[in-house]
Image (cartoon, grey):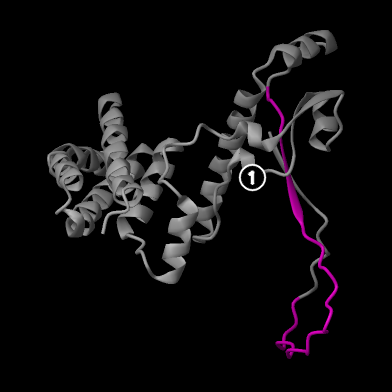
Amino acid sequence: MLVLETVGAEPRRRLLRRRPSAKRAPEEPALATVPVTVATLVAASPLGDHDVAAAWLENADLIAEVHAAVAVLNTVLHAERLVRTDPFVREIAAEQALAIRVGIGNGEDVAHGHWADARALPPAATAPKKRERALRPQERFAALLAGRDVALAAEELTLRARLDLDRGRTREAALQLRIALEAALAELQAWSHHEELATRLAELRDERSVVGAAANRALEGGLDAEQIAEVGRVLGRVEAALLARVAGGLE
């Protein structure tokens, strides 16, 4: 059972029929209260009596429990994104939380934030192992803002494919990868005079049939395990090619 509660939010006012006019803002505006959403996932199956539950908590893989709970929450958020047709409803990562607790207690009590016993985890401890990144990311960030570098469409499309694959949406990942691959092949052509990029582009062209087959299968239904593995493998190659351009400082 997933319980969501918003705390610290001001009560909503009733909508007015007439749009209120804008007012002059004070020179020193008061700080607004920031609402915080508390998400609690209560296991459907009881652990047993207090001693059994305490033993479970003592030996549980807490990080795995956190990621399992976040997966449930993201499933709900993804469904809400679709039913509300709102692209700004986004999924979350465990390390973005302000506080994380794994605990035991009576279901009704836990749903309201009352624990018999709990363990607190620093959100940073739940962060997955970082993938290889471009060298000096802050320098590239500055270059993008200053217009000295360009953000490729393939980079954004590849990130979307990675998110879908990591979230288990394999059909969406295969379809997204097809577009990301074609965008990468087109956009990275400008750097094909560099030997490393030329080699990577040739390898990616050879993957078109694999990606196309996976995308076509995605349109018909679910992918099999082999195709899911292939999507992950080719996605990694696209990521590596994009990274090579940035990390190498290629012009």
- Indicate the amino acid at tag 1: Gln
Quarter that holds the N terminus = top right
Q: In which quadrant is the C terminus drawn?
A: bottom left
Q: Is residue 40 magenta?
A: yes
Q: Secondary structure at mark 1?
A: helix
Count how many numbered circles sit on residues in the image: 1
Q: Residues within 10 Å of mark 1 (few under 14, many from 20)?
A: few
Closer to the camera, 204 or 35?
Answer: 204
The residue at the point 83 percent across, 77 percent down is: 29
Magenta stretch bounds: 15-44
Residue positioned 26% across, 25% down in the render = 226
Q: Residue at x 77, y 9 (%)?
A: 55
Q: Is residue 82 visible?
A: no
Quarter occupied by residue 120: top right
Residue matched to label 1: 96
Residue 110: quadrant of the picture: top right
Q: Residue at x 58, y 45 (%)?
A: 92
Q: Say left or right for 201 vs 223.
A: left
Residue 10 image position (x, y, % from top left):
83, 64
Q: Position of residue 100 (x, y in %)?
A: 73, 35
In terms of depth relative to the viewer, which is nearer, 152 or 76?
152
For residue 245, side relative to residue 42 (left or right): left
Image position of 96 with respect to 10: above or below: above
